[in-house]
Image (cartoon, grey):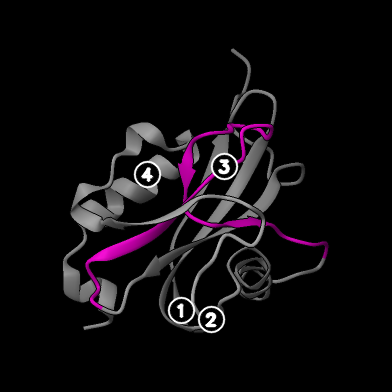
Amino acid sequence: MPNTAPDAESALRVVAGIILAPDGDRILLARRPLGKHLGGLWEFPGGKLDPGETPLAGLARELEEELAIQVRDCVPFLRLEHDYGDRSLTLDAWLVRSFTGVPVGNEGQEIAWVERLSLDAGVMPAANRPIAAALLAAPRDRLRGG
């Protein structure tokens, strides 16, 4: 039987920000552009790491580029591997507990604040679904650092 697990050497390295609203009850999602891989689905904002870039540096860069926000406080939340068949990835998801700036879709993407307890994994890429499940199960104080 063939091994379908992503090869750590060839897997695409990506980061995602779980951006919490100051109230701690809402999370910012972005809609993938229609012409891109998995277009039209809602995701946790982020993107590919540049060669030699750390996940934290890549997260800060991606959120500045995509949303015009600057990360002030974040912590690792979940690392997972996923194989889409045509591409494999290693995804580092970070809880962004505080940021400066006002989020905007700098790349023309739609963005929306969604109640954490109303997250619908069915409208997300498969790699984001375990993150959504972990967020739904997490106590609110864990997300806010309490």
In primary-sequence order, the first of circles 4 and 2 is 2
The local crowd at label 4, few if under 14, some if 14 to 19, many if 20 or more residues have their Cα within 10 Å, is: some
Please tell me which residue lies in front, 80 or 56: 56
Please state if 142 lies on the left or on the right of 7 as rendered. left
Labelled pair 1, 2 in contact (Cβ < 8 Å): yes
Q: Is residue 108 above or below residue 3?
A: below
Distance in Å between CA atoms under marks 4 and 3: 18 Å
Say if the magenta span includes residue 47: yes
* Sequence-first disc among 3 and 2: 3
- Mark nearer the N terminus (1 vs 3): 3
In magenta, the rendered stretch is: 23-51
Q: Residue at x 59, y 33 (%)?
A: 39
| Residue at which label 4 appears | 130
In percent of width and height, residue 132 lies at 33, 48
Residue occupying image coordinates x 64% and y 54%: 14
Q: Tell me the SS state at disc 4.
A: helix
Looking at the image, do the residues carrying marks 4 and 3 touch, with CB atoms under 8 Å apart?
Answer: no
Amino acid at pointer 4: Pro
User: Callout 3, which amino acid?
Assistant: Arg
- Local crowd at mark 1 within 10 Å, few (<14), some, or many (≥20)? many
- 27 inside magenta stretch: yes
Assign a secondary structure to mark 2.
strand
Q: Which mark is residue 74?
A: 1
Disc 3 to disc 2: CB gap under 8 Å: no
